[in-house]
Amino acid sequence: MKKEISRKCENDRDNCPVKDVLNRVGDKWSMLTVIMLSDHGTLRFNELHQLIDGISQKMLTVTLKMLEADGLLTRKMYAQIPPKVEYALTPLGESLVTPLMHLYDWANTNMPEIKASRERYEKAVAV
Amino acid sequence: MKKEISRKCENDRDNCPVKDVLNRVGDKWSMLTVIMLSDHGTLRFNELHQLIDGISQKMLTVTLKMLEADGLLTRKMYAQIPPKVEYALTPLGESLVTPLMHLYDWANTNMPEIKASRERYEKAVAV
DNA sequence: CTGGATCCAAACGGATACTG
DNA sequence: CAGTATCCGTTTGGATCCAG
């Protein structure tokens, strides 16, 4: 079970799914975007812009394009003036929410302990 | 349930556990390191260096320090010449493996679909 | 063997101005 | 409204050399 992970990473150097998915999941905004779309359903560009606290317009654009390219969300343009574009998760994108949940739960549960550990570490280093 | 995630991220801007954990989980080498230690148990510096394909010595050092600071692994030095240092996951570190598994399984399952989607997207853009 | 210290190129990402 | 284009500081991370 466990062994499977590293064995794949050792033998299949350029095709390690963990690396690949973490590169996507791990970037600054992708996961927040997926989460927002999961929570709120279909959203327009500006709605996302406001929901994802602190994201710049540039990064939102880039992030949405990546997620679209990966097939995690769909982009629906309406031929209107002013333009209207709606983003929504695909089933694939939705399916990512579940494992993400587990990670979130872990983070939520253990963050206090981690923060405490960081502070202890800081003090130990200072000495 | 779902709502919880984004609500926390919206209201608690500087204390969003998702951001926080993804900053740790999402960096280039942390997760691979945790996985290796989970699979192989206690490992020495050079063993990790060889197991984690492609990591530089610098990044391994940095990554190990971060994980130690967060309390995810322990560092055990032996007062010898030449030095010997052993790294092992703490219970906290072990507990991270489970949610990571879910992510790994998702990645493993869906990577083909994602790659196919990326190729389709490339071609669509090229036109 | 286990790192620390430095240098440097590339990638990331914010701010701003502009467009259909 | 939904981006694109550009500039530019910051961060990341590899290579290399050095040390206990």
Image (cartoon, coloured by chain):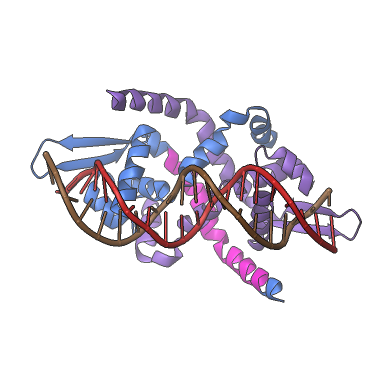
Chain colours: A blue, B purple, C brown, D red
Q: Is residue B47 left or right of residue A81?
A: right
Q: Which quadrant is home to the C terminus of chain A?
A: bottom right
Q: Is residue A106 above or below residue A126?
A: above
Q: Is residue A6 left or right of residue B10?
A: right
**For the point 58% across and 29% down, which residue is it?**
A14
Q: Which one is nearer the viewer's eye here, B10 or B115?
A: B115
Q: Is residue C18 left or right of residue A1?
A: left
Q: Which quadrant is home to the N terminus of chain A?
A: top right
Q: Residue furthest left?
A: A81
**For the point 62% across and 67% down, which residue is it?**
A118
Give the total of numbered labels: 0
Residue A66 part of the magenta-drawn span: no
**For the point 64% across and 50% down, which residue is it?**
B59
Q: Is residue A8 visible?
A: yes
The location of residue B19, given as percent across then percent down, is 46, 56
The quadrant in which residue A68 appears is top left
Q: Residue furthest right?
A: B81
Residue A104 part of the magenta-drawn span: yes
The quadrant in which residue A65 appears is top left
Q: Which one is nearer the viewer's eye here, A80 or A106?
A: A80
* Residue range (magenta): A96-122
Give the overall secondary structure of the magenta segment. helix
Q: Is residue A105 visible?
A: no
Q: Is residue B60 left or right of residue B126?
A: right
Q: Is residue A17 above or below residue D10?
A: above
The location of residue B84, given as percent across then percent down, is 85, 53
The location of residue B62, given as percent across then percent down, is 65, 55
Q: Which one is nearer the viewer's eye here, A36 or A39?
A: A36
The location of residue B107, given as percent across then percent down, is 51, 34
Q: Is residue C3 above or below residue B57?
A: below
